[in-house]
Amino acid sequence: MARRSALVSLLAIACLAAPSLAQNRAAKPLTIYVVDVEGGNGVLFVSPTGESLLMDTGNAGAAAQRDAGRIMEAVHDAGLTQIDNLIITHWHGDHFGGLAEIAKQIPIKHYWDHGPNVQPGQAADDFLKNVYADLISKSQHTVAKPGDKIPLGVTNVTVVISAGMPIATMKGNGAGQRNPECANFQPIDNNQEDPMSVGILVSYGKFRALHLGDNTRNKEFELACPVNRIGTVDLMLGMHHGQSSSNSPVLVHAVRPRVAIVNNGTRKGGEPFSMQSMFSSPGLEDVWQMHFSLLSGQEYTVPGAFIANTIDQPESSMPIGQYTPPPQGQQAPPAPVHNGKSYFFKVTAQQDGTFTVTNTRNNFSKTYRPGDTNATR
């Protein structure tokens, strides 16, 4: 009888503990690491259930080992033993450059890309033939299509554009609404590969983050006009390094991010056109930058607390006005160098839409809760 009573008591305790354990599991955040790859791209998503997605791998050439090492710091911080999914958004060296080095250090289970390179160049074509073909032969490989779902545990990842093809209009969160900015759109030409980028929408409960790779203004128009196909988001990532060939108000103002994180370098991206587009977006609360931008000067660069990295030999001051390039035919001086210690932004997002951005250089963090903003969304 005593044994039976003890068993009943244990079962009762287990029943009481089960909801608590479930709540603890549910309370784990989606974690996003935005890594400094000096004006390239490297973003790691880690689901609350442990699955991972790495989006791009930084720069090629002499910078490949440096950028791979910085991405692996984020991988180690997340406690990962493998990368479940890896997206190469497009075949530019600042996006695929560190892949070979990373693949030496950690297993990669599933590769995603937009398909063949459409901008022939020796570096990219040699990489595809001599490195990438071997890597994907040993793992799963998928050519991403709009509407594809990339498995990431309890986190929903949807491909919204790939190989120049945008997704059909999604449901909810303001998707399908007509966009008044369309009438003011200004198209711009660009290279062939940027507009082929894989772009994704990452959702965890009510939290939504958008990363469009290096898709350009013309592709932004297709996603946002005549109606907004995506709806509103909480966080916008990458922003094509903050370059002016992207970040048209036609898209940025339509998706209305509360926060933008720009993967710019010291003299790459963070350009006035893009910064103006972000700062004037309805509902925007903050912009966080990987580096200060000499291209925009103090006019548009954010306060230092929101900047993740300095340079190897910090300057005593920064110009107020934007950078003026030298006359045509004259060589610009080298951009400030940053090969030393780097810092990433770490974003943690909860199912109710609350998220926190932390600058690991100075441990400054800010939390954004649903309903905190006074702006209409």
Image (spheres, rainbow, N blue to C red):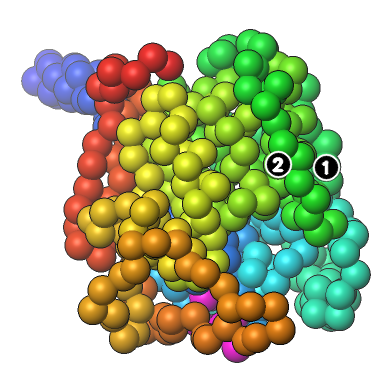
Q: Quadrant where the N terminus lies?
A: top left
Q: Nearer the viewer, residue 250 or 136?
A: 250
In the picture of the structure, the residue carrying the numbered disc 2 is 217
- Contact between marks 2 and 1 (CB within 8 A): the answer is no
Is 33 positioned to the left or the right of 302 in the image?
A: right
Secondary structure found at label 2: helix
Quote the CA–CA distance across marks 2 and 1.
Answer: 12 Å
Is 264 positioned to the left or the right of 304 in the image?
A: right
Give the mark, 2 or 1, whose residue is nearer the N terminus: 1
Task: From this view, report whether residue 120 is shown above or below residue 225.
Answer: below
Q: Residue furthest front?
A: 327
* Residue at (77, 64) in percent of width and height: 91
Task: From this view, report whether residue 245 is shown above or below residue 236.
Answer: below
Asked which quadrant contains residue 254, the reply is: top right
Look at the image and say whether residue 63 sits in the magenta stretch: yes
> What amino acid type should be assigned to the residue bearing mark 2?
Arg
Task: From this view, report whether residue 355 is shown above or below residue 211.
Answer: above
How packed is label 1: few (under 14 Cα within 10 Å), some, or many (20 or more)? many
How packed is label 2: few (under 14 Cα within 10 Å), some, or many (20 or more)? many
Disc on res. 131 = none
* Residue at (65, 33) in percent of width and height: 158
In the picture of the structure, the residue carrying the numbered disc 1 is 164
The percent position of residue 351, horizontal first and vertical second, equals 38, 26
Q: What is the span of residues highlighted in magenta in the rendered image?
A: 62-68
* Residue at (86, 80) in percent of width and height: 122
Task: From this view, report whether residue 52 is shown above or below residue 371.
Answer: below
> What amino acid type should be assigned to the residue bearing mark 1?
Gly
Instruction: Look at discs 2 and 1 and give the one toward the viewer.
Output: 2
